[in-house]
Structure formats: structure tokens, C-alpha cells
Image (cartoon, rainbow, N blue to C red):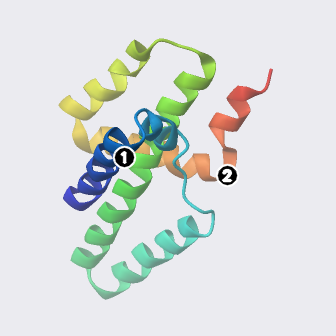
Amino acid sequence: LSMMLDLLLGRWMRSIAFDPGRFAGEFRQLTLPRWLLPLAVALVWLGGLQDAALMTDLLMVGMLLYGFVGLAVMHGVIQVRGLAVRWLLPVYLLLAFFPPQGIATLALLGAVDTFVQFRVQQGRP
């Protein structure tokens, strides 16, 4: 989590210094390739065959990856639909008060977005 937050923070700071406002658009378009989801599931499953602790660690990494994608999906859908930013308040409250459930929900949203592409669908009339 710390490394991924550091990467996002570093990218945000770079955009402030060299190209203000660019990070928001890039974050809202954040997605992972389709082949990564089956690979992540397979790694978690294979890790579970080795050791339960390894499976838990791999699951946390996968959930964090797709959790950030889910957060980007929420930001992207709200931006595409032209809604106010306050619509993100429940998402951040969920993350603040119930972090495990919030990350799991966002990870599920990010994983489903791999195939459904919510942000593209919201742009269509």
C-alpha cells in the first residue's frame, strides 16, 4: 500500500510541477490489462496451495491494485456523468471507517471494470 501510494503521490507532485491538472485525468483513466486479472487469480490460488500466509499476502496485493482501479472508476464515472464531487463522499467514508470492506468493494468494482468498462458505457447516450 505504501509503495502504491508513494507512486501515486510522486506522479501527482510531478504533474503539479510540470503539467498542472494532468494527474486527475490520468487517474480517472487508470485501468489494468485484461490478462492481469486471470493471472492475479491464478497466483492467489497457487499461493494458497503453497501456504495460507502466501495466499493472504498475494490476495492483499491484488486487492490493492484493483482497489485503486475501482477508485479511479468511481472518479471517472462521476466525471463522465457530470456529477458533483460530493458524490464520492460515501466512497471515502467507507474507506475511512470500514477499510477492509471498502478496499474489497473497490477491488471488485475494479475487477469487473476490466471487462465491463463502466467509464466507456457512461459516455454513451
Q: Quadrant of residue 98?
A: top left
Mark 1 residue type: Ala
Q: Quadrant of residue 46?
A: bottom left
Residues 49 and 107: in front is 107
Residue tagged by mark 1? 104
Q: Residue at the spot x=23%, y=55% of the render?
A: 6
Q: Position of residue 17 (x, y in %)?
A: 31, 42
Mark 2 residue type: Phe
Q: Is residue 90 left or right of residue 35?
A: left
Q: Is residue 70 left or right of residue 117?
A: left
Q: Secondary structure at mark 2?
A: helix
Q: Residue at the spot x=38%, y=13% of the render?
A: 86
Quadrant the C terminus occupies: top right
Q: Is residue 87 left or right of residue 30?
A: left
Is label 2 in contact with label 1 (beta carbons under 8 Å)?
A: no
Q: Position of residue 121 (x, y in %)?
A: 72, 33
Disc marking residue 123: none
Residue tagged by mark 2? 115
**105 above or below 60?**
above
Q: Residue at the spot x=37%, y=85% of the render?
A: 49
Q: Quadrant of residue 65?
A: bottom left
Q: Is residue 109 left or right of residue 105?
A: right
Q: Residues within 10 Å of mark 2 (few under 14, many from 20)?
A: few
**52 above or below 117?**
below
Q: Position of residue 38 (x, y in %)?
A: 57, 70
Q: CA distance from mark 2 to mark 1?
A: 18 Å
Which of label 2 and label 1 is nearer to you? 2
Q: Position of residue 109 (x, y in %)?
A: 50, 42
Q: Secondary structure at mark 1?
A: helix
